Image: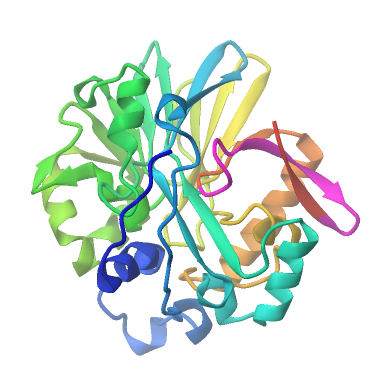
Amino acid sequence: MKTFSLLSASLLTLALAACSEEPAPMPEAEAPPAEATAEPTPTPEPTETTKAASEDVITFQIGDMEGHALIDGGFTMPVADSPFAAAQPVEEISAALEEADLPGDTMSLSLHPMLMKTPDGTLLFDTGTGGPPAGSLMTSLEAADVAPEDVTHIFISHSRFDHVGGLAKDGALVFPNATIHMSAPEWEFMQANEQQAAIVSAISDRVETFEPGAELIPGLLTAVETQGHTPGHSSYRVTSGEESLLYIGDTMHHFVISVEHPGWKIAFDTDEPAARAKRQALLAELAESGESIYAYHFPFPGVGHIETAGDSFVYIED
């Protein structure tokens, strides 16, 4: 197993707070509610990648097409420092985890971009952190027999660092031949974020924006508007024959808390009420349709489906 070395507290804080990066302060009238911007101070622990080097890639089917889950790494943090603890009692979060036979004192989130090799090119969905304490995407791509130059299209769910950090390194494009797709509202949001200035500068000439909900590759890929976590957050629906899979980005973060307690708030949502409503509506839709999902932060490989459980929902790994 690959083990991440212990980093300085400041670097670890930056990495775990990647989901909470915000642009320059908005005018007071437009500022999100306090609970949506609260940033708990994480004290994460070193964590191991979910799979060993020989298992950095998990292949799964979408109809007649193959998808590939690529491990980038993961975060483990005390429950008290998790983004859910900003608005919910730690005791309730711990109890929910223990009820699911998980440790009640820590919470883990995986990071795993998705890859598809299609007649339209090699598609990558999100790019991980680009460095510690995750940053194993290049190893996973190599295991999938894909070089960075082979990637032709990158689809960004949203512009938080743990999803776009792998786009650029030292001011240069990591995927030099790829067109980078994100929604127009998300690109505007990213450009306004001073913390993302270096990445914005590196990728500007490669970005193509789309309107929320646009069909991006006819018959294969459609963007699904899921704003709330960020202003232009997008999920992506991949269709092959009679089957489809929804790449949900950060519409949900934890496979127990986000699914079984969708009304609980998460500190990193820029528009918390919108994100909560979207999450609840999407869970109901997925439970009814049985559609497969690809969940970036669920346990690797994050491919499964949602079922109804009493008056709530449960995630079932496929």
In depth, the one of 119 and 60 nearer the eye is: 60
Nearer to the camera, 136 or 27? 136
In the visual, does 151 lie left or right of 173? right
Residue 306 located within the stretch drawn in magenta: yes
> Which corner quadrant of the image does residue 303 belong to?
top right
> Which residue shows up at 25% across the image and 76% down it?
24
- Residue 186 in sight from this viewpoint: yes
Front-most of residues 208 and 200: 200
Residue 151, magenta (yes or no): no
Q: Quadrant of residue 190?
A: bottom left
Give the position of the N terminus as an image quadrant: top left
x, y percent for residue 39: 43, 78
Give above or below for 71 relative to 177. below
Q: Residue at x 21, y 66 (%)?
A: 195
Q: Residue furthest bottom?
A: 28
Residue 311 position, x and y percent, is 88, 59
**Rendered position, 148 above or below 51:** above
Q: Residue furthest left?
A: 171
Q: In screen coordinates, is 268 left or right of 6?
A: right
Q: Quadrant of the C terminus?
A: top right
Span of residues in magenta: 297-312
* Residue lying at 56% horizontally and 43% vertically, measured from the top left: 295
The residue lying toward the viewer, choosing from 142 and 263, is 142
